[in-house]
Image: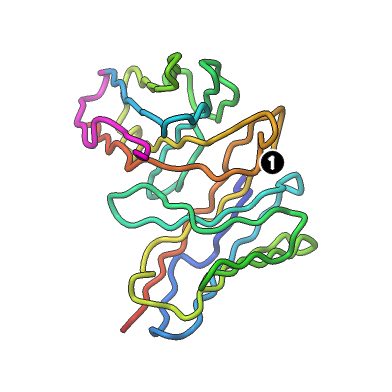
């Protein structure tokens, strides 16, 4: 079974640009979450999508947005990039049914390393 | 406000000895706790978890202990091996409306010396 796939692995953008990152979850997983990892703040939750709907959102500005497609693939977009947006962006997927809605581990992709210059 | 804290940024142990990684949390709504291991340039890999209804969960060399009254959990690795050298993240979640986000600590870098 293929794992969580994130593309691209590395990206360099300049301030003010926008960027779109992609995540393909494990087959059958409908929940996709995004996290930002920085040296100072650690791993921070961005948002979670389930069945094409945003179900939960972290404390990030509106420049950070996402969406999920009918095949569960997800994209996140960051507009008007700032130097502080340089980070490793991680996507995670979870198996979920009506009966085990919580308490399941998330499986992470390798991440996209975004550098803003 | 950091709800999950790993107060030791790093830990060094000898091969064969026990590694104990600690984690404290403040949110009493957390009901599920996980440990992830992360190598450089890779995503976190799930290691072990524990539900708040338990106080111990064991999987091979890894055991997680939960002390709810102290809002503290720990990960024990016995015996430690050089391949265990990585950054270990503690995470917690509180199911809310069918969705839960993981709140992570900042990680502890474990080095196991041969």
- Residue assigned mark 1: B94
Q: Chain of mark 1?
A: B
SS for callout 1:
loop
Mark 1 Cα shell of 10 Å, populated few (<14), some (14-19), many (≥20): many
Left or right, residue A79 beside residue A93: left
Q: Report x, y in % for residue A13.
A: 21, 27
Nearest the eye: A86 or A65: A65
Left or right, residue A105 beside residue B100: left
Nearest the eye: A16 or B86: B86
Q: Residue drawn at (34%, 38%), measured in percent from left and top? A: A2
Nearest the eye: B93 or A116: B93
Nearest the eye: A26 or B63: A26
- First to last magenta residue range: A1-17
| Relative to A86, residue B36 above or below | below
Q: Report x, y in % for residue B49.
A: 60, 56
| Relative to B36, residue A110 above or below | above
Q: Residue drawn at (27%, 30%), measured in percent from left and top? A: A7
Q: Quadrant of residue B7?
A: bottom right
For residue A16: magenta? Answer: yes
> Which quarter of the image is occupied by the C terminus of chain B?
bottom left
């Amino acid at each position: 079974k293929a794992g969580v796939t994130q593309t691209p692995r590395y990206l360099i953008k300049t301030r003010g640009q926008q960027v779109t990152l992609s995540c393909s979850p494990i087959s059958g997983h409908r929940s996709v979450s995004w996290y930002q990892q920085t040296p100072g703040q650690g791993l921070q939750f961005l948002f979670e999508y389930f069945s094409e709907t945003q179900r939960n959102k972290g404390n990030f500005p509106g420049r950070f947005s996402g969406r999920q497609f009918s095949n569960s693939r997800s994209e996140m977009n960051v507009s008007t990039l700032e130097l502080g947006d340089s980070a490793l962006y991680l996507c995670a997927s979870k198996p979920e049914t009506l009966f085990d809605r919580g308490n399941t581990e998330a499986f992470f992709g390798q991440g996209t390393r975004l550098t803003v210059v | 406000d950091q709800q999950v804290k790993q107060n030791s940024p790093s830990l060094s142990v000898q091969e064969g000895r026990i590694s104990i990684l600690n984690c404290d949390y403040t949110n009493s709504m957390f009901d599920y706790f996980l440990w992830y291991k992360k190598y450089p340039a890779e995503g976190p890999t799930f290691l072990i978890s524990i539900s708040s209804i338990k106080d111990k969960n064991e999987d091979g060399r890894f055991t997680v202990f939960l002390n709810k009254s102290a809002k503290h959990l720990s990960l024990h690795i016995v015996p430690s091996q050089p391949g265990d050298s990585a950054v270990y993240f503690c995470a917690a979640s509180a199911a809310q409306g069918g969705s839960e986000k993981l709140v992570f600590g900042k990680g502890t870098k474990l080095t196991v010396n041969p």
